[in-house]
Image (cartoon, grey):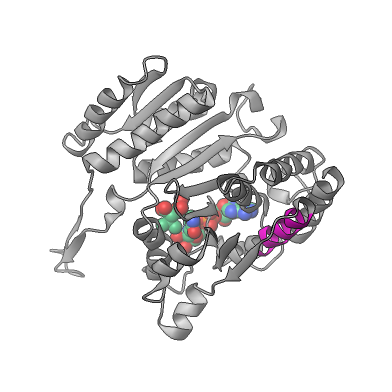
Amino acid sequence: MNLAFIPGDGIGKDVTAEARRVLDAVASAFGLAVCVDTLPWSADHYLATGVTIPPDGYAMLRDQFDAVFVGALGDPRVPDNRHARDILLGARFELDLYVNYRPVRCLDDRLVPLKGKSRRDVDLVVFRENTEGLYVNIGGRFKAGTEDEIAVQEEVNTWKGVHRIIRHAFEFAQATGRLRVCMADKSNALTHGHALWQRVFREVSADYPLIEARHLFVDALAMFMIRDPAQFDVIVTNNLFGDIVTDIGAELQGGLGMAASANLHPGRTSLFEPVHGSAPPLAGKNVANPFGACLSLALLLETLGHAGPARAIESAVESCIAARGCTADVGGHLGTREATDMLIAQIQSTT
Ligand code: NAD
Ligand code: IPM
Ligand code: MN
């Protein structure tokens, strides 16, 4: 398989290096033929060349690679985040990766931050619409810098966009035996855009009589995810709300360092990345947790049909966490590289 790796910025570079080592380990353990191209697109590259992503960048990702792995993008030296918008959001849009799949599964009771709850209570998935909503970047600023400044940022909801993500959530629920789908919007305040979500949810859910279709306003969803996450199997929501509630989801798994994600267009080249960002204060210090990145690599392998290596990575992460062979954010004493060494040793001892 041909993979593009984009380490990006900050701890994105640290954790991508580790995901790369884990990939080599599973490739040799399972006899996978893997070819990796590492692409330099990042804040450093932008500041040095003025190029965020080359003009043929999206076509190259789509045509030359089976999947793309991204570390993280974001750097204080690029305050308007232009390079992240072009590289990460640009790839989501241009490759039409309309499904942002963010599993929320806690691997150890010790990591559950909620009083009286165990890992059994934290096992849900979030489907975030990934190609429209408030992320379309339509708008502008008028009289910028004055006291008369007006800033407009439009939210776009299309029938096609809303329909395909809600349909995907129900299809996933049906295929995996998860019997509850919750759609979260803010249709009590956003009475135009989110009325479309209401309508489509009603229409699509009617095709799945065995699946419980529930609606929550997103503020109530945030509250219930903390009060009692066990009531959720599948959550589907828009781009911005999905971004926010998946940071809550990350915390339920032990923190941002543990959370994995996939940006998918089923059947096409898709992109895999940890949920966390570039965490500039941690960058280059051998402290970032590499497991969210490694679990994102597992999602990549699974999506490309390599379920064995994917499971091997997941169960090795679980064993490392159980043995506290992990970084400090999840209760261990190891550095980024040493936690990955332990993960790789675990993979090698079980395959
Ligand atoms: P962040 O996820 O980078 O970090 C927030 C905090 O979470 C960190 O300070 C750290 O305490 C913890 N954390 C995150 N990842 C960790 C890891 N692997 N190991 C241990 N601790 C970890 O979020 P932020 O500080 O809001 O954003 C920093 C930059 O990253 C910004 O430029 C932002 O735009 C960007 N960002 C990028 C992505 C992405 O590329 N997908 C996602 C989120 C934020
Ligand atoms: C994420 C990130 C991105 C998003 C940022 C970096 C633009 O927070 O992937 O969760 O908002 O989608
Ligand atoms: Mn986010």
* Residue 147 position in % (x across, y down): 16, 64
Q: Residue at x 68, y 60 (%)?
A: 33
Above or below, comparing residue 82 to residue 191 in the picture: below
Question: In the image, 324: left or right of 139?
Answer: right
Q: Quadrant of the C terminus?
A: top right
Q: 162 and 267: which one is in front? A: 267
Magenta portion: prevailing SS class:
helix
Q: Quadrant of the N terminus?
A: bottom right
Q: Residue at x 62, y 53 (%)?
A: 293
Residue 304 shows up from this direction: yes
Q: Is residue 24 magenta?
A: yes
Q: 95 and 48: which one is in front? A: 95
* Residue 267 position in % (x across, y down): 45, 48
Q: Is residue 240 magenta?
A: no
> Which contiguous range is marked in magenta?
17-28
Identity of the residue furthest to the bottom in this view: 49
Q: Quadrant of residue 214?
A: top left
Question: In the image, 345: left or right of 185?
Answer: right
* Residue 154 position in % (x across, y down): 20, 52
Residue 243 shows up from this direction: no
Q: Quadrant of residue 118?
A: top right
Q: 10 and 103: which one is in front? A: 103
* Residue 49 position in % (x across, y down): 44, 85
